[in-house]
Amino acid sequence: MSRLPLHILQHEPDDPPGTIAVALGELGVPFEVRRLDLGDPLPEWPGETAGVISLGGAMHVHQRHEYPFLDAEIRLLRRLVHDGGPAWGICLGAQLLTLAAGGEVYRRREPEAGWTWIEKVRDDPLLRGVPSPFVAFNWHEYSCKLPPHGQLVAARGRGVQAYRAGGRAWATQFHPEVDEAMAPHWVEDMAREYAHRGDDFIAGLRADTERFLPGYPAFCRTLVRNFVCTAGLLACDPPPARG
């Protein structure tokens, strides 16, 4: 196992690592947060990092001329995917990883926003111990088409929600990191942005947050443990044999 730190790539102040950082700390996995929006450098692969978790952000992959660090991040993710290095892209990070792996990113007709039910479509270590369907928080205007050799892991209707891009690289469109500090701000921002959807949408969003948020950190902890175990960043017991 590497004792190099795992690097969390943060793109903006409103999407910090949240429960991901808490879970890594509990597991004893060394990590560093790089604030790319503040000019922090990307880690070097190989040599400086054990792998990366790329978070979300309000910017889009098609705004790379406005955010030059996105192109550099795509190049880093491309090296990780090519070398079989550990990588996990979340929302914007998933879209960057998709481009790095040779897939496509497209603008949705309507943003996907709020708590959504998602179906697992195959057994995969990242979602080990997660039921199907499961609920997760989404907020994105763009979606991914699978790259060559990508394996769909979870979906909502026809939309990709999670896939495996390589031996130790995954993309999740949903946000597992959302915690009690982040959720109130996200929900109110979403209520303002999508006020045109009407009072029922906003009331449902707030009710769903009260219902699902208390158990959401456990979901994130499961994914984080699965990621670091499968990526070889933590010595883990093998899963129990199926009877």
Image (spheres, rainbow, N blue to C red):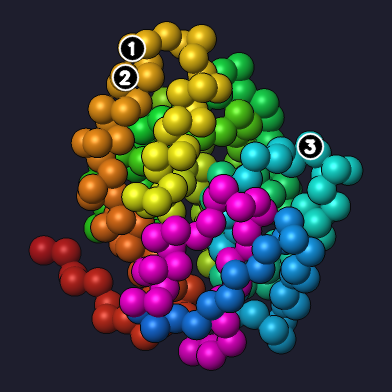
User: Magenta segment range?
Assistant: 1-26
Which residue, given by chain and number where applicable, does mark 3 sit on? 62
CB atoms of marks 3 and 1 within 8 Å: no
Mark pair 1, 2: CA separation: 5 Å
Asked where in the image residue 65 lies, by quadrant, the reply is top right
Q: Amino acid at mark 2?
A: Ala
Q: Residue at x 67, y 26 (%)?
A: 107
Q: Is-magenta flag for residue 17?
A: yes
Instruction: Tell whether label 2 touches label 1 (CB within 8 Å).
Output: yes
- The residue under label 1 is 200
Assign the C terminus to one quadrant of the image: bottom left
Which residue corresponds to the image point at 42% horizontal and 25% vertical from the top-left?
157
Q: Residue at x 49, y 14 (%)?
A: 195
- Alpha carbon separation for disc pair 3 and 1: 32 Å
Q: Is residue 218 visible?
A: yes
Q: Is residue 91 above or below residue 166?
A: above
- The residue labelled by disc 2 is 203
Instruction: Name the residue at 49% across, 28% down.
Output: 190
